[in-house]
Image: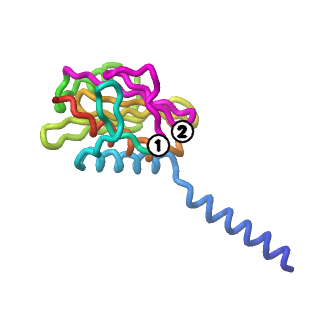
C-alpha cells in the first residue's frame, strides 16, 4: 500500500508542477511588464565600465574584449548580448526602432514602445526557433539584443532594459 501512495503522490505532484509551468506567451508578457517597469524607473546605478562608458551590469555578467565604447559584447555562460551605443542619438531618438521596423517581413510577438520624461524606448521579441527568441530593448540611442531561451525571456528583458536605461548618452 505505501508504494501505491508514493506513486500516486508523485503523479499528483507531476500534474501540479506541469500546471505551474508558464507558457511562452506568459513569459513574454511577464518580460514586457519587467521591461516597462525598468524603463519607467530611475536608472540603475552604474557598476561597470567599457572603455570610457559606464553602465549597470547584474552580477555574473562579463564585458568581453575587444569591446569599445559604442559596441559592447556581454556574456553570461554561453549566452551573448550585444550592446550598441549611438552617441549621436538623444534619449528621445526613434532611430533604432525605425531601423528595426524597416523590414516588414519580420513578425514580432511583442512590439511595444514606451515614452516618459522625454525618453523613447521599446522592446521587441520574435521567435526564431522552437525554443529561441530574439529580444531587443532600447532607450534612445542605446540598444541591446540577444537570442534567448524561452525560460530566460522575462529575466533577460528586465536586466537588458535596466542596462540600456543606465547608460547616459547625453554627457
Query: Quick one: label 2, few (<14), some, or many (20+) residues within 10 Å?
Result: some
Quadrant in which residue 99 is drawn: top left
Seen at 49% across and 30% down, the residue is: 80
Where is residue 47 shown, x and y percent of the image?
34, 41
Q: Specify the quadrant of the image occupied by residue 166.
A: top left
Disc 2: which residue: 149
Residue under the image location 28 percent in, 27 percent down:
97
| Residue at screen point 38% across, 45% down | 158
Q: Alpha-carbon distance for marks 1 and 2?
A: 7 Å
Magenta stretch holds residue 69 = yes
Left or right: 17 in relation to 45: right
Residue plotted at (22% across, 22% down): 87
Span of residues in magenta: 60-88
Q: Pick whichever, 63 or 138, lies toward us.
A: 63
Residue bearing mark 1: 153
What quarter of the picture does the C terminus occupy? top left
- Looking at this view, is 18 or 55 the one in front? 55
Give the SS element for disc 2. strand
Q: Residues within 10 Å of mark 1 (few under 14, many from 20)?
A: many
Residue 127 in view: no
Residue 38, x across and y down, in percent: 30, 47
Amino acid at each position: 500500500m505505501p508504494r501505491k501512495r508514493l506513486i500516486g503522490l508523485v503523479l499528483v505532484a507531476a500534474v501540479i508542477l506541469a500546471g505551474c509551468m508558464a507558457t511562452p506567451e506568459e513569459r513574454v508578457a511577464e518580460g514586457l511588464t519587467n521591461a516597462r517597469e525598468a524603463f519607467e524607473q530611475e536608472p540603475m546605478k552604474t557598476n561597470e565600465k567599457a572603455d570610457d562608458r559606464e553602465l549597470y551590469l547584474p552580477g555574473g555578467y562579463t564585458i568581453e574584449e575587444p569591446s569599445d565604447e559604442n559596441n559592447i559584447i556581454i556574456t553570461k555562460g554561453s549566452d551573448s548580448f550585444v550592446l550598441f551605443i549611438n552617441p549621436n542619438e538623444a534619449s528621445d531618438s526613434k532611430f533604432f526602432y525605425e531601423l528595426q521596423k524597416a523590414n516588414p517581413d519580420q513578425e514580432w510577438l511583442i512590439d511595444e514602445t514606451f515614452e516618459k520624461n522625454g525618453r523613447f524606448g521599446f522592446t521587441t521579441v520574435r521567435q526564431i526557433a522552437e525554443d529561441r527568441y530574439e529580444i531587443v530593448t532600447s532607450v534612445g540611442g542605446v540598444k541591446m539584443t540577444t537570442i534567448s531561451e524561452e525560460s530566460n525571456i522575462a529575466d533577460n528583458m528586465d536586466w537588458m532594459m535596466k542596462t540600456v536605461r543606465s547608460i547616459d548618452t547625453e554627457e
